[in-house]
Image (cartoon, rainbow, N blue to C red):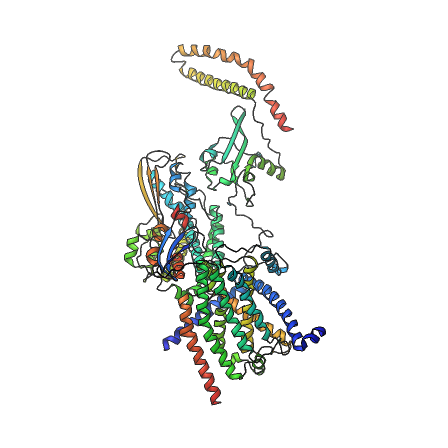
């Protein structure tokens, strides 16, 4: 640490250590989330889920990850090879970078940028590109359909998402994530902005391609959607990205609406993680309850319901702030 | 790269024979324009086993186990249809208790078939959880049927002349408990599925079948009842002990998927009513006709017997030439007729709708392929 | 406008109702069985493969090797070979089922004249090789008898040609004796009416009656007992 600090200065050392911690967090988080999803699904469906590997199947996902690593990386003949190989990396890197600005607690921020929220939103949009690359390069009709759906869906849901975020930023007056959390030391914004919270959660579910908006990989229609042709670790990277995306989306929701690290008794980081996992549980709960929406209904829902409501919410917020 | 040439705006997509939502080995050849379907053509025959030909090489009793394999979900109705046709041919009269046992077990089997459909259909629509609840209920039901018939899926229980084994008290109390349990579960299904806004949006006004189309394509079962035609063999050509029970035929009005879904759920309720009445009125007496010959050797002739399965009209047509083996058996299966409307319904819909429509037909592919 | 908001509200409520169902089931106890650790007992009529019923009176099977089951079986998967070691009593020396063809219809049980068969409660019937699914249920019966502490029913050896010849001779004798008895009966019945047939009958029987003391002791004394001893060992 000190050596690193000498070379790179305090800020640089912080970055390096932070990145290593982030990579560890991402892997552990994905392993945990996959296990959690299995358990949540299982118990909602009156069954125990994985029970064999480790206590209550706790290291089942580790075994699965090892299996996926040992698998052959199949590259079908007719694929567009460079893009096909690049897609899993492109899908994974942005979500990794998003961790740079997530404020786990007052001091646990790798880099507290003054445009933090904008950075995260910008990076999260990049995953669409990766899905499009994967789908197009796979040279598979199901994959292309999945990719096309993904693009339309992500663009449609980006708009209400940004608008709801805007209404929070209007209230705080800063793009800095730590400022947004600090502003909620008295009461959480979910109480002031319940509609924005609901819209945000809906959009976040759609952005992360989770059921009921899992159209890019709707398995009863498109077999496996954009990752039909992927196998082994490349497939695992898509999986990892999906669960990390969920974490990021929930982390932003925690920052924006649930008061971040604020909470009594426990240390801030614990509170933060608790809130994040509660939100992830909510998203899993959606997945194991609802049927999938149809594609045109999905777009209709975004443009006819979410965007007007989000705009109305923004206007009302602005009016109230102006009048106060 | 996939070539989307500008001149030809369509491309071909193979849905199946190995695809998560074709329920077996059905293949649908789709011609698509973007995500819209311009032409759909079901390709069948991947599971052909030649049941009808097998019938010509074995005697009347030996063909019994085949009936459970034609439609594995409602095997007992197929058992019943075949046995009744043979009885008609020979002139056997099944004693009343035998008929009651047939009705009780066949109706339980109908419920189990519909439960599988509800679960699998919701899986097609992307809801993962209902199938587990349905299978939980079905598992209770299969335990009951297992007690009586000895099998859980491909039943071979009815015999020409009656049923070989009687009901026991534990089955009767178990069935009553099951009826109670399923009635409370219907509320959960309603909240989880039937009232769900996403489900309603996916199914309402999708795959609408008019009454004319029903007649034109020879549809039967919930497909035709969903369109508002109250056609049910149990009422229109009453057989077995059905005339003695009070039940109604649920019908829809619009003929869309939602109507078909509601019809099937209501049918489960009606089946529960029939079973309840049958258990209350269960007569004593023999379960097998007296004087069933060891070797069934009917006189020359031909018969047709239709029964109502979970999917529609199953007809068994037997031609006998006075031999111990049938000369020809023709099985009229409901799924084949029902599937034939798919090309017309699929035009100008999305892939997601096609999956929804295909699921709502409730095809059992081995039944089509035979 | 009101409709628009009403629809949203109703839709939102329906989603919440659905979520209420799943969360209620989330806290309910699980209903599945952890299969290799827990196993279910099968219902009394459960159909595993067929096996021979142990008669509680005799402690052995009732099979008379009539092959009715083999004949009725739709898949022709039952092979029964029987042998007559004593007149009028056929015993199976081989009862093989090729289980992988079985469709569990139960026709063999119903066709059995002595009700010698029953369903086993086995359900761990998956095997890696086709040959492993071929069962000789006579051997299985012996295992069951050993487990139950009953005397084990021996499986007879396939008969030699001599034995077969002897059995044929014995059969012939029996048939003749039967014929004789029938004839006598007939004679007795007809005697008062006419004497001529009665006089003829004893003449026809004479050679058979003479042959009997010559063959019968030899046939019964040695070979008939020999296989029985072998089996006992």
- Quadrant in which the N terminus of chain B is drawn: bottom left
Q: At 45% from the left edge and 43% from the top edge, which residue is drawn?
A: B165
**Residue B74, image x, y percentages:** 41, 50
Q: Is residue B348 left or right of residue C156?
A: left
Q: Nearer the viewer, residue A314 or B11?
A: B11
In percent of width and height, residue B181 lies at: 47, 59
Q: Residue furthest right?
A: A2
Residue depicted at x 51% and y 67%: A285
Residue B282 appearing in the image? no
Q: Is residue B163 left or right of residue A13?
A: left
Towards the viewer: B260 or C64: B260
Quadrant where the C terminus of chain B lies? top left
Circle count: 0
Looking at the picture, tell me which residue is in the foreground, A166 or A72. A72
B366 left or right, relative to C145: left
Q: Position of residue A11 (x, y in %)?
A: 65, 77
Query: On the rendered structure, is B313 left or right of A179?
Result: left
Q: Relative to C7, does residue A291 appear above or below in the rendering?
A: above
Residue at 40% from the left image edge and 64% from the top image edge: B202
Relative image position of residue A308 (x, y in whole percent): 41, 77
- Height in image: C5 above or below C137? below
Vertically, is A283 above or below C39? Answer: below
């Amino acid at each position: 640490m000190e050596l690193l600090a000498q070379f790179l200065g305090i800020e640089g050392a912080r970055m390096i250590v932070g990145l290593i911690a982030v990579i560890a967090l991402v892997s552990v988080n994905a392993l945990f989330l996959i296990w959690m999803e299995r358990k949540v699904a299982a118990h909602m469906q009156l069954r125990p889920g994985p029970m064999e590997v480790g206590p209550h199947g706790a290291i089942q996902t580790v075994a699965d990850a090892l299996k996926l690593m040992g698998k052959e990386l199949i590259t079908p003949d007719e694929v567009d090879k460079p893009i096909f190989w690049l897609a899993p990396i492109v899908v994974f890197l942005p979500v990794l970078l998003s961790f740079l600005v997530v404020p786990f607690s007052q001091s646990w921020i790798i880099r507290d940028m003054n445009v933090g929220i904008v950075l995260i939103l910008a990076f999260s949009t990049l995953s669409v590109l990766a899905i499009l690359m994967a789908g197009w390069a796979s040279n598979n009709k199901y994959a292309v359909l999945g990719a096309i759906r993904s693009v339309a869906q992500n663009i449609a849901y980006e708009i209400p998402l940004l608008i709801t975020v805007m209404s929070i930023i209007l209230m705080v007056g800063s793009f800095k994530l730590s400022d947004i959390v600090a502003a909620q030391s008295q009461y959480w914004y979910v109480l002031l902005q319940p509609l924005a919270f609901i819209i945000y959660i809906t959009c976040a579910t759609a952005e992360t391609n989770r059921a009921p908006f899992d159209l890019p990989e709707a398995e009863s229609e498109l077999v496996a959607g954009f990752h039909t042709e992927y196998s082994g670790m490349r497939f695992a990277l898509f999986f990892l990205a999906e669960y990390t995306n969920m974490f990021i989306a929930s982390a932003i929701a925690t920052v924006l609406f649930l008061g971040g690290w604020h909470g009594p008794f426990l240390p801030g980081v614990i509170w933060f993680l608790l809130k994040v996992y509660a939100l992830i549980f909510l998203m899993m709960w959606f997945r194991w309850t609802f049927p999938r929406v149809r594609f045109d209904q999905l777009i209709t829902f975004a443009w006819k319901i979410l965007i007007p409501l989000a705009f109305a919410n923004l206007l009302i917020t602005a009016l109230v702030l102006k009048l106060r | 790269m996939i070539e989307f040439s500008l001149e030809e705006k369509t491309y071909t997509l193979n849905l199946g024979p190995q695809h998560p939502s074709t329920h077996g080995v059905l293949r649908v050849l789709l011609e698509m324009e973007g995500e819209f379907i311009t032409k759909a053509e079901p390709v069948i025959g991947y599971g052909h086993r030649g049941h009808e030909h097998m019938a010509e090489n074995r005697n009347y009793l030996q063909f019994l186990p085949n009936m459970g394999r034609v439609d594995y979900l409602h095997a007992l109705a197929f058992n019943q249809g075949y046995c009744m046709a043979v009885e008609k041919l020979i002139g056997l009269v099944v004693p009343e208790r035998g008929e009651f046992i047939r009705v009780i077990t066949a109706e339980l089997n109908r419920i189990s078939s519909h439960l599988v459909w509800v679960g699998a259909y919701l899986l097609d629509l992307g809801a993962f959880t209902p199938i587990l609840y349905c299978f939980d209920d079905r598992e209770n039901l299969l335990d009951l049927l297992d007690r009586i018939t000895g099998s859980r899926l491909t039943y071979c229980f009815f015999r020409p002349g009656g049923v070989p084994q009687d009901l026991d008290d534990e089955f009767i109390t178990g069935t009553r408990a099951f009826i109670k349990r399923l009635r409370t579960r219907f509320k959960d299904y309603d909240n989880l599925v039937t009232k769900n806004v996403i489900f309603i949006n996916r199914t309402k006004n999708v795959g609408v079948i008019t009454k004319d189309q029903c007649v034109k394509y020879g549809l039967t079962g919930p497909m035709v009842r969903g369109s508002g035609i109250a056609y049910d063999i149990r009422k229109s050509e009453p057989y077995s002990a059905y005339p003695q029970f009070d039940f109604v035929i649920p019908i829809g009005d619009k003929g869309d998927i939602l109507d078909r879904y509601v019809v099937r759920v209501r049918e489960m309720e009606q089946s529960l009513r029939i079973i309840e009445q049958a258990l209350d009125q269960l007569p004593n007496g023999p379960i097998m006709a007296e004087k069933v010959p060891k070797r069934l050797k009917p006189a020359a002739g031909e018969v047709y017997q239709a029964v109502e399965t979970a999917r529609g009209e199953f007809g068994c047509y037997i031609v006998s030439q006075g031999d111990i083996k049938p000369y020809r058996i023709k099985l009229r299966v409901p799924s084949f007729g029902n599937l034939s409307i798919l090309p017309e319904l699929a035009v100008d819909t999305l892939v997601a709708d096609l999956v929804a429509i295909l699921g709502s037909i409730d095809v059992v592919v081995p039944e089509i392929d035979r | 406008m009101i409709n628009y908001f009403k629809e949203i509200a109703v839709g939102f409520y329906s989603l919440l109702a659905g979520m209420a169902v799943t969360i209620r089931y989330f806290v309910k106890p699980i209903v599945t069985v952890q299969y290799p650790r827990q196993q279910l007992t099968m219902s009394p009529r459960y159909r595993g493969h067929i096996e021979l019923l142990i008669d509680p009176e005799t402690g052995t099977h009732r099979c008379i090797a009539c092959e009715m089951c083999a004949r009725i079986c739709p898949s022709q998967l039952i092979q029964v070979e029987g042998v007559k070691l004593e007149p009028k009593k056929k015993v199976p020396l081989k009862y093989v089922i090729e289980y992988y063809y079985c469709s569990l219809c139960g026709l063999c049980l119903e066709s059995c004249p002595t009700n010698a068969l029953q369903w086993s409660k086995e359900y761990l019937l998956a095997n890696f090789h086709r040959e492993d699914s071929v069962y000789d249920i006579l051997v299985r019966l012996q295992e069951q008898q050993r487990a139950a502490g009953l005397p084990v029913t021996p499986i007879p050896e396939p008969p030699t040609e001599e034995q077969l010849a002897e059995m044929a001779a014995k059969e012939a004798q029996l048939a003749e004796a039967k014929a004789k008895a029938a004839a006598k009966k007939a004679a007795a019945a007809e005697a008062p009416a006419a004497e001529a047939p009665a006089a003829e009958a004893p003449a026809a029987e004479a050679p058979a009656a003479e042959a009997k003391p010559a063959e019968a002791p030899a046939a019964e004394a040695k070979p008939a007992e020999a296989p029985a001893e072998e089996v006992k060992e």
